């Protein structure tokens, strides 16, 4: 009796929560209207079975409630029910989050999936790209974030205003941008208009830009000045470092004291290479596994490595050597002058290929994948990835079909463990499947269809040089858009976080 009562109460409470939701569920016939009638909408495209979607749900609800009063609306679309709508919006994995300002201005949501992060990101999105500042609002604005950027120019200086606004539109997800046309205020800040001051909570506190206003120059200034001389690699900063366009030097150490001590020793080297190489510490206790990605052993710290982020090459510093100013200076100098060879991680080349699926490793990647006489379909997988395991039998079947067909010498079905081999492809999630067509190896096509044998055959036939189609024995039902797993998703499963 008592238990039944409890359950009933629980159900009531659940029902109350469900009806009180501030997240609006949209369908094909309500989506457009909703987006058009609200200035700014964050939409989540999800599938009920998706674990990350379930984890996001309570955070999303909480953000929806706190954003409602600011007229920022949160919506969701169940892609298992609304396949057309999701396809129309280019949804490839779950959850996909997009910011809509009407139907024509759509940008991917780039924040973290926590209530506070969603709220703060969406508030930034709802503000004008450039806030107009006065002497009464400047001080508060300076404290709005770790880095804020303020331009000072004359009210009549339309060119500077326009150039600055363009930069702000581009980088609005990253920093708050403000502008003032008060000459006295500029003077009080120690600059003469037109000028830009980047205020920061670290290093020297601020950096000043006084060159001619030019979008590229301001962007470059912003990126360099906003990056701490020796920053910290973590989940919030990692993607910025990876997209910075310059190499990243990592200082791995297990304690804050050790990180500080090594930073102090390396600071002059970082200063000498400012704007050319980023330097950052990384907590080896939390993110030690990342050392593996740099071809360092993940059980010997402190350690140092440079990653060339554009070509994704790794330059680990010998872990048997001590990390001192002089040793690192010599290593960095050698790196800059091209004297350090990148380290290539590879599994051994298999002596024989056992199954129908050809096993690719870093050392035979070029020979197999870039063989110009063959259409090569390659799957990039990770051993821990569940979607990859689910695909495996179908992938084998696909390879077997081609292996016994007239195309057996023209079409290769291959796979590579992307966690154990350095590969030139940038792979965002697992599995990623690409076709490298014969005669057009720099025009690889990424597969985005459902992972069925039938659809994979169609893909090879449509995109390969040999238009190789084979017939399948059994019929398979077609599936919804396929989900991928990212490295980040693994963080939840392991005690050590991954970046
Ligand atoms: C920049 O131009 C916009 C549009 O004309 C104007 O509203 C704004 O006040 C200008 N900014 C400054 C700092 O004068």
Image (tube, rainbow, N blue to C red):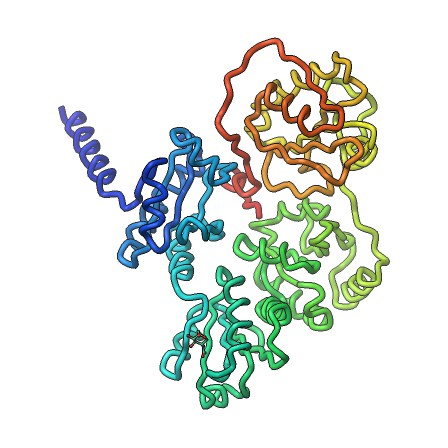
- Identified at 70% across, 32% down, the residue is 435
Name the residue nearer the viewer: 282 or 278: 278
- Identified at 69% across, 72% down, the residue is 271
Q: In x, y percent, where is residue 324?
A: 75, 65
In this rendering, would 28 be left or right of 376?
Answer: left
Q: In x, y percent, where is residue 481?
A: 50, 30
Q: In x, y percent, where is residue 237?
A: 56, 57
| Residue 102, visible in the rendered structure | yes
- Identified at 61% across, 52% down, the residue is 284
In this rendering, would 199 be left or right of 242?
Answer: left
Which quadrant is home to the N terminus?
top left
The correct choice, above or below, for 3 with respect to 23 in the image is above
The correct choice, above or below, for 59 with respect to 455 in the image is below
Q: Quadrant of ligand 1?
A: bottom left
In this rendering, would 67 be left or right of 283?
Answer: left
Residue 452: quarter of image: top right
- Identified at 61% across, 19% down, the residue is 453
| Residue, far top | 473
The correct choice, above or below, for 241 with respect to 164 in the image is above
Residue 50: quarter of image: top left
| Residue 205, visible in the rendered structure | no
Q: In x, y percent, where is residue 6?
A: 18, 30
């Amino acid at each position: 009796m008592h238990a039944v009562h409890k359950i009933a109460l629980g159900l009531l409470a659940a029902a109350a929560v469900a009806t009180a939701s501030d997240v609006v569920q949209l369908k094909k016939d309500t989506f457009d209207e909703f987006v058009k009638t609200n200035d700014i909408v964050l939409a989540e495209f999800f599938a009920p079975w998706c674990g990350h979607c379930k984890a996001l749900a309570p955070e999303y609800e909480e953000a929806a409630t706190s954003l409602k009063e600011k007229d920022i609306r949160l919506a969701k679309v169940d892609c298992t029910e609304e396949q057309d709508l999701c396809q129309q919006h280019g949804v490839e994995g779950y959850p996909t989050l997009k910011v809509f300002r009407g139907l024509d201005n759509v940008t991917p949501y780039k924040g973290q999936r926590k209530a506070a992060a969603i709220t703060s990101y969406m508030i930034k999105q709802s503000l004008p790209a450039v806030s107009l500042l006065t002497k009464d609002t400047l001080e508060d604005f300076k404290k709005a974030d770790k880095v804020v950027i303020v331009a000072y120019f004359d009210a009549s200086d339309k060119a500077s205003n326009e150039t600055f606004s363009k930069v702000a539109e581009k980088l609005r997800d990253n920093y708050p941008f403000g502008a003032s046309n008060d000459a006295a205020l500029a003077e009080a800040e120690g600059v003469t208009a037109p000028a830009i001051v980047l205020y920061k909570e670290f290093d020297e506190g601020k950096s000043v830009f006084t060159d001619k206003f030019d979008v590229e120059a301001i962007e470059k200034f912003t990126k360099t000045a906003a990056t701490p001389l020796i920053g910290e690699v973590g989940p919030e900063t990692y993607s910025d470092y990876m997209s910075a366009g310059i190499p990243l030097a990592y200082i791995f150490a297990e304690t804050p004291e050790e990180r500080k001590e090594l930073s102090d020793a390396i600071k002059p080297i970082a200063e000498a290479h400012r704007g050319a190489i980023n330097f950052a510490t990384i907590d080896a206790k939390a993110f030690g596994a990342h050392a593996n990605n740099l071809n360092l052993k993940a059980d010997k710290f402190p350690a140092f490595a440079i990653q060339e982020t554009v070509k994704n090459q790794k330059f680990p510093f010998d872990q048997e050597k001590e990390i001192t100013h002089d040793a690192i200076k010599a290593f960095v100098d050698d790196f800059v002058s091209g004297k350090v060879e990148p380290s290539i991680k590879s599994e051994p080349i298999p002596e024989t290929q056992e199954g129908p699926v050809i096993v690719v490793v870093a050392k035979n990647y070029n020979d197999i994948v870039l063989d110009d006489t063959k259409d090569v379909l390659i799957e990039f997988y990770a051993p821990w990835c569940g979607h990859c395991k689910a695909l495996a039998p179908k992938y084998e079947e696909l390879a077997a079909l081609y292996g016994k067909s007239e195309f057996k010498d023209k079409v290769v079905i291959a796979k590579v463990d992307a966690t154990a081999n350095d590969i030139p492809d940038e792979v965002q999630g697992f599995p990623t499947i690409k076709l490298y067509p014969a005669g057009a190896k720099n025009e690889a096509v990424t597969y985005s269809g459902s992972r069925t044998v039938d659809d994979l055959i169609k893909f090879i036939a449509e995109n390969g040089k040999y238009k190789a189609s084979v017939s399948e024995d059994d019929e398979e039902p077609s599936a919804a858009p396929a989900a991928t797993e990212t490295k980040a998703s693994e963080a939840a499963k392991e005690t050590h976080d991954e970046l």
